[in-house]
Amino acid sequence: MAAETVGWWGVPLAIAAGTMRGGTPFLFVSLGECLTEKSGKINLGLEGTLLTGAMSAYAISYLTGSPWLGVLMAGVSGMALGFIHAWLTQQPKVNDVAVGIAMIIFGSGIAFFLGKPFIQPSAPQLPTFDLGGWSSISSLQEALRISPLFLLGVALAPAMTWFFKSTRWGLFIRAVGDSPDAALAMGVSIKKVRMLSIIAGSFLAGIGGASLSLYYPGIWSERISTGQGLMAVALVIFARWQPMQCLYASLLFGGAQAFGPALQSVGITQGYYLFNAAPYILTLGIMILTCSPTRTISGAPGALGSGS
Amino acid sequence: MSTRRSLYLPRRQVIRGLLATTAFGVTSRLVGCSSAPESDAGKTGAETAGSSGGDKPLVVGFIYVGSKDDFGFNQAHAEGAAAIAKLPGVKIVEQANVPETTEVQEAMRNMIEQDGATVLVPTSFGYFDPHIVKIAGEFPEVQFFHFGALYQEGKTPKNIGSFFGDVDEGQYVAGRVAAQTSKKGKLGFVAAKPITPVLRNLNSFVLGARSVKPDIQVQVIFTGDWSLPVKEAEATNSLADQGVDVISMHVDSPKVVIETAEKRGIYSSGFHAVQSSLAPKGYLTGTAWDFPSVYTQYVEQIKSGKKLMDGSIPHLTRGGLKEKFVKLAPYGAAVSDATKKDADATQAKLIDGSLYVYKGEVKDNAGKAIIAAGKNLKVTDPALDKMDWLVAGALGKVGG
Amino acid sequence: MQSPRRQHWGKTLESICLPVGALLFSLVLFGIFCAAVGSNPFEVYASIHKAAFGNWRSFQNTLIRAAPLMLTALCTALPARLGLVIIGNEGALVMGGIGAIIVGLGLGGNAPPLVVQIGMALAGLLFGGLWIGAVGALRHYRGVNETISSLLMNYIAIAFLNHLVNGPMKDPSSLNKPSSFPIPAVDMLGVLPGTRIHYGLIYGIVACVIAYVLIQRTTFGFAARTAGGNIRAARIAGLPVGKLTMAICFLAGSCAGLAGMVEVAAVHGRANESLNAGYGYSGILVAFIARYNPLAATVVAVLLGGILASGGILQRVHNLPDATVLVFQGLVFLVVMYSESLYGRLAIFKERHEVKPTRQPAAVV
């Protein structure tokens, strides 16, 4: 019996497990935002995309009984919202940030409106790989119960790095984001590249939503997202627009969510509101330390947010 | 030239904005006119339907702080509202997701002025002060029923009535069931905020558990808000990691906690509503509100001409198991027959008054005696409405 | 290059027709949406009108909702003139509320109500101002992206508020909803005579007018606009860009802080989590739709207030879910934003003998 309780070891264990469980939505949304921002546009509306993704994944999984179909649908509904965002932000005189905020309202409105009948039923969840079968400690088994979505996200990060570095299309996106004029000279259609980048990014954000509703915590409710979509924008800057660093940053943020509850479970009860704010304070702190007024952040797409 | 432009542009924008608003008003007015006959027809139709059943229907307005189908607190109230909507001569109007700001004041005002509501049930704790108090002062002829025991004689306007379900008895029984089912002697509790209704729920659960095994401990985790699904799941997992094998909760929507506990293969004891379908293996029992019964009782009183204002409806109504304000969910598969028998017996003793949940001596978890030895508090005792302590056996602390 | 008079009229007509058309179009879209879910769109329109603008009583509802939005909109609108995109309105509002309650509790009962109210207002201005001022300072001295830092600071301010009202500042009697101690009732801001609208509306309008004058009619505003247009040129011209950034950010934050003070002093009478009611995020939208013009912001705030005010009636009369008003709001703003891009692109508003359309700098428009 004593072997089954992990005591203080529970804190790092919970955080480690939390990184994988809670980090998955951050991972997909931040990779999606990274792709979008590389092309020179900001999509603040991913919060709405995340919610729509979570809702449609849950609804489809419930209606068809296939969670993987739900994941696909989450991505597709994300693409639909991404298309609206991409089309609007490419009109002259339209500001990305403003459209993003309107898209948060619109996306969450659609998700909440259509999602009402799906709050109560239980939808089939995504299967998990149980890598902890060798251990008799149930908490370790739980920590090692890994979602294929998480593994997919982990594989996606290096794949995206490679994509940006070594492929023709990756080069196009970087060119469009860094110096549109050069891209134009290369004969690349800025509009098309940005449109595709935003839509693909929204596809990923929709899948991030699916991981909330079909993996962890595995329900659909209107409070399912606590701002993961909005935070992803900060996360990408934090990660310097590097997909691999998005991975690390997502894990950090996922773990931070487990921090407060884990500490309370071993009896540290002080200031849990402040613990809950830990990831934000940390991000701000690191940004203050690493930014410099004399140069732009390394890795920042040159045309980002310039409206051109 | 540049000054010319800067003077000119804003003016254009202002004109634009002004016109936009007027246009919005005008267009909707035009459209409104064209459809006016239709909506009038609808209205008279509704009225004649109402009058055929007797006199004018009693319009009851319900306001919820969250969504109506959250599998928790708001849904429990909405089910009560749906039950009275079926009664003859009663019409309900509902508004969900109303924050505790001026918005709830406007919602109440609209229900009174536009929908003709004469009875309002704003359900969230936080609506009370200043919002309900303010509107009740403005509309002395409208009756307000607020969930929570916040009515204070002489201070609160006469047209406000508080009603409260004492969950203590239900949770005491649930605590006993949990302690008898637990193999490890460690229980867990996921709580939203350290406020009185939550603490009463928690403490009575602990007292029930300790009445079976006096050395049992309940680890508490406060998430900080009423609905934070990811944090609630993390809290449940952390508790499971610490070897807890029964988890109860007080959050707005217990679905996450119960489903996560089921996945971890541990037991859960629910709250707000009957959630046995969510965890066929691990769900033990739980305290659920019985609002259909509560609201039906109120409607019957109002229809028979009773009023809060003259005191013929009491300003503070509360009840537990006996008054059918709360009920115990059917026992789950994991509950043994002996435990079931014990729980039924305990329930019967609580109902006939031979057993007290708060039976002295009760100490808080810092060792201070809160209820003296030999003294028993009924669950309706006002002293309990000021609860800001955790009972001995609860591991946690009130206050940020 | 003075515009010929005819072109002038074309532009005026354009600036009338486009927003009106956008609103009509979004109403049509929303009508289609309503029809798709089985409600009669015309009845829905009638209800929206009735709830938001139908009579003086319901228009007051709209104005009450608009009041905090005017103030929070300035928090985005002012820095936008410098080319900064700040979305920390919610955090500044919360901080302003905290400042106001500290002063309100400190002075309340010991000083005449007017002094207490002025003290609270100043504290709200100061706290909100310093909060966004810090964002400006980080931007200027450390090069930290102001959009992200202000977003993060929202979460930090809300956590700080929750920590205070659940811990150090908690009134032990606020058992059901952790709050600070209440300020004395005499020190509360009243309502405008004959209405139920609190003084926050006046604060909002006055702040918007002052902001307008400051930006459009003063050297300070001119400097800010110049720096917003081209920061390098401004530096060469010897403008103190750092000081300008800090000053504008301070003013912006103090407007949102004042909104927090109004929430504390006119609505809640105490500080608690209800301060964080989303006025900040709505304010961002108002600022963008108004194109950063403080006067236009007052009008847009009223429009948004009207939309929000109609949310209740859609639920009560038409049995539509509570999310319907979000869909409506989203549609209106997306369409209005699209309509902005049509300026100068529609043939009917163009004059035949137009010389050449001058391109307007993006920051001014």
Image: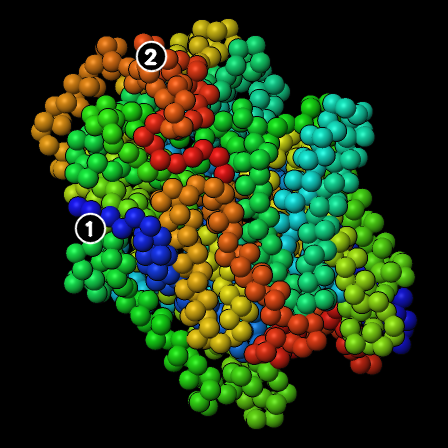
**Disc number placed over residue B373 in the picture, else none:** 2
Dividing the picture into quarters, in which one does residue C97 lie?
top right
> Where is mark 1, residue-wise?
A3
Residue for point 44% across, 81% down = A161
Colour option used: rainbow
Q: Position of residue A227 (x, y in %)?
A: 48, 55
Q: Are marks 2 and 1 on the same chain?
A: no
- Alpha carbons under labels 2 and 1: distance apart: 39 Å
Write down the chain letter for disc 1.
A
Say the numbered circle drawn on residue A83.
none
Q: Position of residue B128 (x, y in %)?
A: 53, 26
| B107 lies above or below A111 | above
Identify the chain of the residue marked 2, using the numbered disc in the image.
B
Q: Is residue A89 visible?
A: no
Q: Would residue C76 appear left or right of B75 to someone viewing this image?
A: right
* Nearer-the-camera pick, B122 or B353: B353
Give percent across and percent down for residue C29: 52, 57
